[in-house]
Amino acid sequence: MTYTDAEDRSPQLRGALESVIGGYMAAVAEVLLTEEVPVASTSAYGDVHDPSQDDFAGDVEGSVEFTRAFSRRLLGDGGETGLLWCGVSGWCFFHIPEGSGRSLVDSARWMGSGLTPEPVRVAAFLSEVRLDPREAGSGERPFYRAPHSAPDVLLRRLEAFDTESGPDDVVTRLRDTACRRRIVEALTAEDQEIADVSLHTGELEALTDLLEYVEGTTPDDVLRELARRLTRDLSLRARDGVESVDEHREAFSYAEEQR
């Protein structure tokens, strides 16, 4: 699709850019989830003429964001972490500590490697970040195109990553698949020991409520059934005591069927 100069500010152009940027974010998320990186969400922003982006010397952008637990493991705090794709400068890793008041740009470590590197290269950059988050990449920001310029060219460049079902649906499906794989592997792992864990009754209730919430919200049939069976296992063990730990293992039996 080609846009004329008069159409550069149209909602159709913004929607088209957000679709292809979202597809690019989904492609990166797929590689990361395959490598068991806990992707929490993705985003895409396609208003190429937004003047508020001038403070950042940018225009369109996308992001792949991670869980707070990932941030704690990587950097020792629960601040925001993620990969940002800037339509002017390509990819960077950012970390904003909780309560720091720092901006994303303050913490950015820039990948380089061009404006739209392949998703596997972005995943390799994150591997470098995980080895040394404060030294990976560069603190010096690169510039590959001028802000607000040639949106039609950028759109064509990103069209290879567009998705038919929509990037949000793709990422949801990818996260469900990755979560299902991890749960099945955990439930069926060999040489498992019995953990001695004490819970308050309210904590147990909260955990089973959370599993019931997952059962009711995920579109993945296997995840729903795993959540249902694990909820039942925990509830019955709480009722029947520690001696029943090997009796109530419906989730394990179902996971064995999924291998």
Image (cartoon, helix red, strand yellow):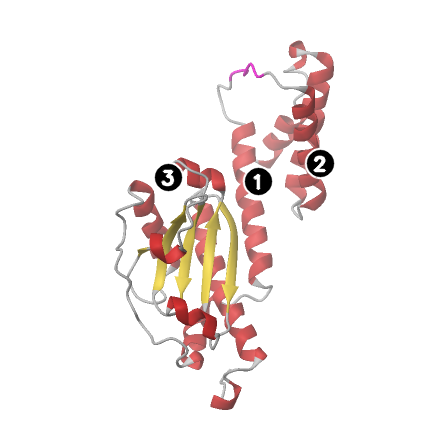
> In the rendered structure, which segment of residues is drawn in magenta?
193-197
Report the predominant secondary structure element of the magenta stretch: loop
Q: How far apart are marks 1 and 2 (CA)?
A: 16 Å
Spatial CA distance of label 3 from label 2 is 32 Å
Asked whether the residues under the numbered discs 3 and 1 touch, taking CB atoms below 8 Å apart as contact, a structural biologist would say no
Question: Was residue 106 drawn as part of the magenta stretch in this picture?
Answer: no
Judge left or right: residue 152 versus residue 135. right
Q: Residue at x 45, y 44 (%)?
A: 99
Numbered badge on residue 18 = none
Mark 2, residue position: 212
Residue placed under numbered mark 1 in the picture: 180
Task: Label 3: state its secondary structure.
Answer: helix
Q: Residue 80 or 52: which is nearer the viewer?
A: 52
Q: In this view, does 144 lie above or below 100?
A: below
Residue highlighted by disc 3: 75
Local crowd size for mark 3, using a 10 Å CA cut-off: few (<14), some (14–19), many (≥20) = some
Instruction: State whether residue 138 is above or below residue 97.
Output: below
**Residue 53 x %, y %:** 44, 70
Relative horizontal placement of residue 19, taking residue 118 as reference (left or right): right
Q: What residue type is labelled 1?
A: Arg
User: Mark 2 is on which residue type?
Assistant: Glu
Quadrant placement of the C terminus: top right
- Please tell me whether mark 2 sits on a helix, a strand or a loop: helix
Establish if 47 lies above or below 238.
below
